[in-house]
Amino acid sequence: MSSTSTIVSLPDQSTAKMPKRHYINNEHGLLSWLLTGDHKRIAILYLISITFFFFIGGAFAGLIRLELLTPQPDLVAADTYNKFFTMHGIIMIFLFLVPSVPATLGNFLIPIMLGAKDLAFPKINLLSWYLYLIGGTLTLAALVLGGVDTGWTFTTPLSTHYLNTHVITAASAIFVAGFSSIFTGLNFIVTIHRMRCPGMTWFRMPLFVWSHYAASLLMVLGTPVLAIALVLVLLERLIGIGVFDPTKGGDPLLFQHLFWFYSHPAVYIMILPGMGVISEVISTFSRKRVFGYTAVAFSSVAIALFGFFVWEHHMFIMGVSNYSALVFSLLTMLVAVPSAIKIFNWAFTLYKGSITFETPMLYAFGFMGLFTIGGLTGVFLGSLGMDIHLTETYFIVAHFHFVMVGGMLMAFLAGVHFWWPKMTGRMYPESLSKLAAVTTFIGFNLTFLPQFILGYLGMPRRYHAYPPEFQVLNVLSTAGATVLGVGYMLPLLYLGWSLKYGAIAGNNPWQATGLEWQIQSPPLTENFLETPIVEHEAYDYDWLANKTRNEVTTVG
Amino acid sequence: MGISPVLWQFLTKWLHASALFPAEASGISPYVDALYFFLLLMTVVGTALVAALVFGFSIRYRRARNPVATQIDGSTLMEATWTIIPLAIFLLVFVWGALLYFRIYNPPTNAMNIYVVGKQWMWKAEHPGGQHEINALHVPTGQPVQLTMISQDVFHSFSIPDFRVKREVIPGRYSTVWFEATQPGQYHLFCTQYCGTQHSGMIGEITVLTPDDYKKWLQESTSGMSLAQNGERLFASMGCNACHSGNAAARGPNLAGVYGSRLTLANGSDVLVNDAYLRDAILNPSQHVTAGYAPIMPTYQGQISEDGLIDLVEYIKNLQSNYRIQQTLVTSSSDAAAPTTPPQGTITPYMVKP
């Protein structure tokens, strides 16, 4: 253990001024945004579009919770309820969670963190946003035309033979949005391999980049399988090719294999970039190098690798061979380990740090607590005998919401607050945002902790009506969802407010080490005036302290 | 479990009374609950540990107390610790869960069989004695019950939370689950796999009776015809007996006693004749030709309902001799070999009711 002490004290940022020229005012007019190749502008386009879809998906969640306030099916008809949870799932997963961190923060930051001017393929980057938009529009079309009620899992033969809703529109939407995800992943992989600035070796990259690298591998290798599965569903529906139809010699379980072969890695596509955010935030507000950099970097890659070989744990009760279930359960246990490694490394990053508690840090702490619960309850479901009782109940609903909402959404909000000054040049209001972070945390636990109990009691998921003895816990959950809704509305309001009235942020309000903090906020279109040369490790606070000292002498 | 039985009883009693915990109404439930409590303990300890580290370090090393951070690269020893300990715990959970899984999904040999057909949006249970139930199932205590289940349309899932058992009900394929009920009473039956509009209406009641009450219930609810008797009628009316007559010259294999035996197929593979094989052989005969026979059997896909298939399977399962088959009039085509007449005065020939 080599250890040195550092104090970083940058000049006061309160006198900072907005730079005259930056990527936002470089060009004007709607077309300059819609035809841009600038990764930062595309990130902003993505941020606006995913926020839009997040609130649509959230509205459906609210309606679901409202219906479940009472055991009777009294708010909406059964079909309508089924459409609610289907649209909630499709929008939240394919249009919010999958692109959330990579397409916004990743898009904005990866080139800057690597010292590059842009991603490797700026036009493909723009294309991927348009594909996302087409996917989103098709989803909205399916919604407006009357909705779809397959569940986001599109289980055959229900989706192919037994429903007359807009399955084809919705499946095409996901098919198209999938290509948007593939292009983003491809762009990241090439950029990380080819566009690192001089001196930026693999092990000098911020962990944010490592986790995006792992997630990109999953996007590029996994998403095509989803596309295949969806095309087969469409062909089965349109011309009855019979791949999934037992009466024509097909196998209905085949669809589940294909679907989960993507959709399990997809949860790592969703969570890995969030983990990258947490590494940056915790290091910055502890003023300390991430504990076990290599272990955290490789655990991302390990998650990506193992993540491809656990899909059958979604099918333990579906009559798969008992022995194959054994193998998949064992691999599921193995994939849990790298996540545990990450959690402990983040916790020990705090050790001997100099910690402050700005909003991104509060969200990161929330992430650590909720993701730990989410991860450990995943072990329940990976354990074969336990899975039989728990799968397809509210336990699994609570589990994946702890990982996806408690984990990923917390990480997304941590990241948005953390890089907001860099993206917009202005600070968010600190005390209001702390209130939002705490509200979110409380609301989240109130919503989803009761669902674990409901699940063990046996309440099945996707139920429009339920036995009356489950009502108390459902009322708690709905109350929590209300609090959670407030927690999510707050950032929308005050971040919007801060665009005009927020304090000027300055280059490096957090005194962070990343390359993105060494340039002006908001950055120039070309990011750097001259190509940076990196001669220090990631999270090198000594380097930052010395750099600051030199700068001060130069100015003085 | 290292916990004392008295404490354990107290704990479970208290939990059941609190409406936050499901009843333990089957033989397997205490075992599932034991694993659950272990996992719960793991989660509480794990979360508490992370919380303690985060809060402890946050207080001890907050900027006001520790203005200068000490840079530390990491520690291989620590990394090894928090790799190996979680791995060991997870592997223990894996072994424990696997043992439980095999126990829940491998029925004992003395299990009594009940058929279940799932369809949008109801459960139909068929007892071998011919009792039919919709969205209900009566079972006795103290007797292992195996359910052989199939779906007529989409995926369903048969779940009895108070028994801690659940299994997907799949179109085109039998799946099985077994349990042994221990407490008489009424329990929820849920369909847990999303199956369309009335998914949440696909529920029912499991009624657990004492063996005596169960016997009484069986007698009161019989429809007069057992599944095997229904199957026999179907067997004759579909003309199966034309070929499967058991004669030496018959065009189809002898079915008496075939259930449970090992069969060599025309393609050289060796199969065990069970419910699933019989069903597949009826629906898709060309893939299941017994060695030595010509592939002449037509498919019955779409001609027999799942209920009918269950009747046929149950009939063939219990078929021990070909005597009655050979007594039955052949309706579809005549067999070259006429049925043999039994010696006069032994048994009065018995005709199946039309």
Image (cartoon, helix red, strand yellow):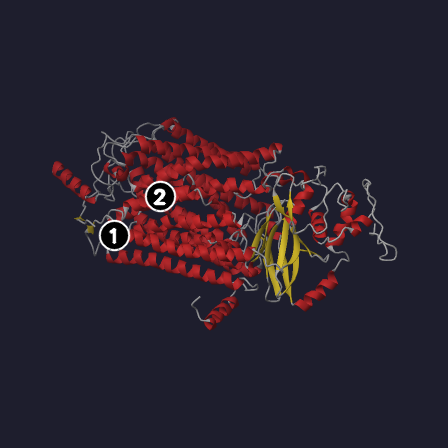
Neighbourhood count class around disc 1 (C-alpha, 10 Å): few under 14, some 14–19, many 20 upward: many
The disc at residue A355 is 1
**x and y percentages locating residue A513 in the rendered image:** 24, 42
Left/right of residue A155 with respect to residue A304 in the rendered view: right
Could you tell me the amino acid type at mark 1?
Ile
Q: Secondary structure at mark 1?
A: loop
Hey, which residue is sitting farthest bottom in the picture?
B6
Q: Is residue A517 visible?
A: yes
Residue shown at 23% from the left, 52% from the top: A353
Residue shown at 54% from the left, 62% from the top: B28
Q: Secondary structure at mark 2?
A: helix
Q: Quadrant of the C terminus of chain A?
A: top left
Could you tell me the amino acid type at mark 2?
Ser
Q: How much space separates mark 1 and mark 2, taking CA atoms? A: 25 Å
Of the two numbered discs 1 and 2 on the same chain, state the one appearing first in sequence.
Answer: 2
Give the vertical position of B93 relative to B295 (above or below). below
Residue at mark 2: A300
**x and y percentages locating residue A52 in the rendered image:** 44, 39
The subunit carrying tag 1 is A
**x and y percentages locating residue A24 in the rendered image:** 32, 32
